[in-house]
Amino acid sequence: MQEVTAEDNPYSAGAQEIEEIVTEFCAAYFGGDLESVKSFLMDQYIWDIDVYENSTNEVEIMSVKGLEDIGEKNIDDVCVVSVEYKEEGMDTYVYLTVEFIKTDKGWKIEFYGNEG
């Protein structure tokens, strides 16, 4: 991904923070690092915790969708972004949906899952 300075970034401060977190989360998720994935989740995470299973193909992240809709948020506000990616050799895109909630400890993930 191309590095963007704060002056160049068109997103709100909250969206920039989520963009940074989702980038780090994706590195852990696609890298198979379950312990790191857990560090991004809210304390009361109720869903199955998993990581990307297909380690034989390289994954290319194309974009993060939904950041432009995020303004400044308050505690307990929810934001959803989709990470568009594709596996090496595949023609179709897959989406990793990530739902964030703003807590007193910062943004935490309250749900994530793949959509084909």
Image: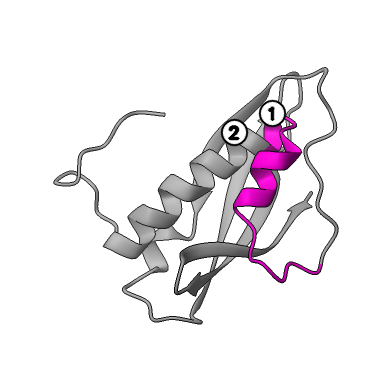
In the image, is 114 to the left or to the right of 71? Answer: right
Q: Are marks 2 and 1 in contact (CB under 8 Å)?
A: yes
Residue 61, located in which quarter of the rendered image? top right
Q: Position of residue 60 (x, y in %)?
A: 61, 27
Residue 81, located in which quarter of the rendered image? bottom right
Is 19 located above or below residue 54 in the figure?
below
Which of the pair 13/105 is nearer the observer? 105
Is 77 located above or below residue 4 in the figure?
below
Circle 2: element type: helix
**Start and end of the magenta stretch?**
29-46
User: Which residue shows up at 82% across the image and 46% down it?
Assistant: 50
Q: Residue furthest left?
A: 7
User: Which residue shows up at 14% across the image and 46% down it?
Assistant: 7
User: Which residue shows up at 62% across the image and 50% down it?
Assistant: 39
Residue type, mark 2 in image = Ala
Q: Position of residue 2 (x, y in %)?
A: 34, 28
